[in-house]
Image: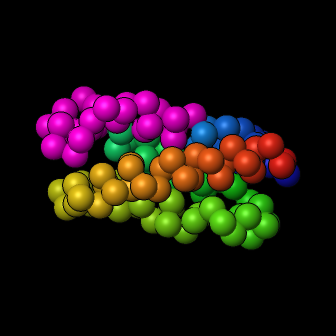
Amino acid sequence: MSDIQGRQWHFYLDDMIEFAEKVVAYTDGFDQARFVASGITYDATLRNLELIGEAATHIPDDVRAANPAIPWRMVIATRNRLIHGYLGIDDDTVWSIIRDDVPDLLSLLIGLKHKA
C-alpha cells in the first residue's frame, strides 16, 4: 500500500520513530524551565513534534484502525495545534507531551514496526 507520491507507509512509520527519538534526545536532562528557555532546542523539538503528526497523516486508515493503542488522532491534532497556534502554544502542555506521551508513543511505534 502506498500514498499518492508512491512512498510506502512503512517509511512514514520510520520517520515517526526517528522524529520521536529526536524529541527524546533533544530534551534529555532538561527540566521544563530550561527547555522553554533553550531557544534552538525548543524550536527543534516543536518541529519534530509537528513532523511526527505530519507523518502520521500518511499512515493508512486500515493500519491506524488495526493499531488503536496509538493515539493517531491526538498525534495529528498536536501537529495541527503546533503549526496553526504559533502564538498560543501552551508550554505546560508541550512539556507534558514530551515527558509523558512521546516515550510511550515511541514504544508503540517500534512495536508496530516489528509487527509490520
Q: Is residue 5 visible?
A: no
> Is residue 10 or residue 111 the one in the foreground?
111
Q: Is residue 44 above or below residue 33?
A: above
Q: Which corner quadrant of the image does residue 83 belong to?
A: bottom left
Q: Which corner quadrant of the image does residue 84 belong to?
A: bottom left
Who's the residue at 44% across and 37% down the image? Answer: 24
The image position of residue 32, as x and y in percent, is 22, 46
> Is residue 61 or residue 34 the one in the foreground?
34
Q: Is residue 8 left or right of residue 99?
A: right
Please identify the dominant SS of the magenta region.
helix
Q: Is residue 9 left or right of residue 44?
A: right
Q: Which corner quadrant of the image does residue 30 belong to?
A: top left
Q: Is residue 17 above or below residue 94?
A: above
- The magenta-colored residue range is 18-43
Q: Judge whether residue 12 is colored magenta.
A: no
Who's the residue at 60% across and 40% down the image? Answer: 17
